[in-house]
Amino acid sequence: MRFLFKTTYRQDLGLFRDGVQRNWYVALGLGLLVLPALVPAYLVDISLVFIYGLCGVSLMVLAGYTGLVSLGHAAFLGIGAYAHVYFVQDLGLPWVISVALAAAVTAAAGVLVGLPALRMTGIYLTIATLAFALIIQEMLTRWEHVTHGLKGRPVDKPVIFGVSMANDAAFYFLCLVVLIGGLCLTANLLRSPTGRAWVAIRDSEIAAQSMGVNLARYKTLAFAYSAALMGVAGALFAHKIGFLAPDIFSVLLSIQFLLMVVVGGLGSLHGALFGATFVALLPVLISEARDRVPAWAGHVVAVAGKDAASATFLTLDRFVKQPGLEPGLFGLILVLFILFEPLGVYGRWRKVQVYFSTFPLYKRATFRRQKTYMRSERLR
Amino acid sequence: MTLLEARDLGINFGGIRALDGVSFAVEPGQVFTIIGPNGAGKTTIFNLISRIYDPTQGRLVYGGQDITRVPPHEIARRGIARTFQNIELFEHATVLQNLLLGRHAHARGHFAEELLFLPRVRARELAHREAVEKVIDFLDLQAHRDSLGVNLPYGVRKVVEMARALCTEPKLLLLDEPSSGLSVEETEDMAFWIQDIRALLGITVLMVEHDMSLVSAVSDRVLVLDYGRVLTQGTPREVQEHPEVVKAYLGG
């Protein structure tokens, strides 16, 4: 087991806990650099992981750190996507400026939702954001001369400073850079007074207020910042799917975002990324399984004999081809996590880490009290 | 000059008159205690001072200024900090983060600078950290610096909450039942700390308390409330011998 020996206050201000942790991140970065060469076929899917990662960070700031649960984040994604496409394709603005403007527009929408949020808490706020999402979806359908309504509108590949990002690897790196940028800015906020004020509001509004936190200001700020991140993600998302239609930004997508932060682990940026990986890659896994099960069946028949193997694989085949498998699995996994691991994938990851670093002295009680997190999530 | 003065303070919750014409004055450097049976309106006075409730009548004057209509987050900035009867720590933050939040009154938002974590932000954070460490040393919290609020024993949480209030560098500290739930030894420690806070830090203390041994040990002046009205005021000794007080506590 390692003990961190701190000698200056500066050590508590770093983005990384210590040199070892920093080195792991550098290694991860190098891995992501060479990834396009290793799995060229999956780059588009991995780009989606990055985009969802940004969405996850956005919702994590709001739900995980400020304690304001939103069921309307797909609407912010939609606003960002449509605004960006409008600025780039209809107004012909440069890509970077267009993304910045899209973020600003989405942030303004976030403030608009945030204002009534000052008078609402918990489940009531969640319902209000849900209503907001439905209104936005309707608006995207009706405001035809900007959004092209139900006909939808195609999205060009991004061109940044005259360089086309049309190929998959270029787009992969674009998404990666934006995600890392978003993560750094968010991590900076979280180690500053603003981030502490958010956490304070989450854990006790009355105490936060008595310590001088202006609730109105910081709740609105959380909404605006979260929405701005969502706006940037929306711009990338538009390029990723290549075609915008209002029904993409449905409540189901909002629920997926919420699933992402809960399964990943509320209250940690790691969690947002774990959750995004899970939500973006599960559909890929399912479709892979659909394609491959018959082939595996062939192999197993050759090894294990006909009857037993074919019966097993017939069942498996029927299972993976079941319609609605994806939402079903999402739901099941969400329920299992809430029951058994309220701290999400990140919580599980921490336990594994602690198990090995304290081996053989690990005791389950170390984490017993932290189970209370969900309860204090305070859906009051 | 009087530090805090309540003039004819009153508040109604629906048809219930929780406070009725309460007046008192806290002088700088005093330990001023409010006692009274359950439901007498003690914590309500605190909630009026920290501006969580709006009084239906009367005024609060602090340091010569009327604070009856000041927004609640302004109160800390003016030098009034408080603790809560049922401990309101930020449970999923470390003790250090809890105390740093106590510095919030001195940390004006600089959103753009914080996004980029400019050297200026870092310098301010270090300054806050130094101020926090002084409080940690003062209240002997070194061992708990990195513990999460939820994982702390009850007695330590009470101390952390008091530390958080001290981090705002208050002129007036409101302690809501500092000894409730504490053991005899912890209550004695609390008495010493309250005396130190007054003597070493020069902070005026206004507290609500039930434990009469603690009240007599530290208070300069005691106010007795019953059913939202002031029964009497005076030194701890005078108050304990007052026939009305005996009647309110023992019935009669």
Image: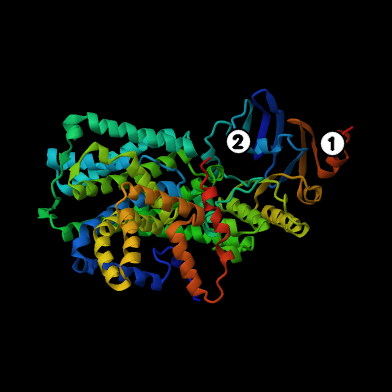
Q: Say which residue label 1 marks.
A: B245
Residue B216's mark? none
User: Residue at the location (39% across, 53% down)?
Assistant: A189
The amino acid type, in three-letter code, at marker 1 is Val
Most foreground residue, A211 or A173: A173
Chain of the residue under the numbered disc 2 shown in the image: B
Mark positioned earlier in the residue sequence (1 or 2):
2
Q: Say which residue label 2 marks.
A: B64
Which residue lies most toward the left here?
Answer: A162
Residue A216: image x %, image y %?
45, 38
Chain of the residue under the numbered disc 1 shown in the image: B
**Is residue A184 in view?**
no
Which colour style is shown?
A: rainbow
Label 1: element kind: helix
Residue A150: image x %, image y %?
20, 33
Label 2: element kind: loop
The amino acid type, in three-letter code, at marker 2 is Gly
Residue A218: image x %, image y %?
43, 43
Residue A109: image x %, image y %?
32, 37
Question: Callout 2: 10 Å neighbours few (<14), some, many (20+)?
Answer: few
User: Tags 1 and 2 in contact by the CB under 8 Å rule?
Assistant: no
Which residue lies most toward the top here?
Answer: B15
**Is residue A222 in view?**
yes
* Vertical placement of residue B231 versus B169, above or below: above
Measure the C-alpha gap from mark 1 to mark 2. 32 Å
Count of number-bearing discs: 2
Same chain check for tags 1 and 2: yes
Quarter the C terminus of chain B occupies: top right
Q: Nearer the viewer, mark 1 or mark 2?
A: 1
Quarter where residue A81 is shown: top left
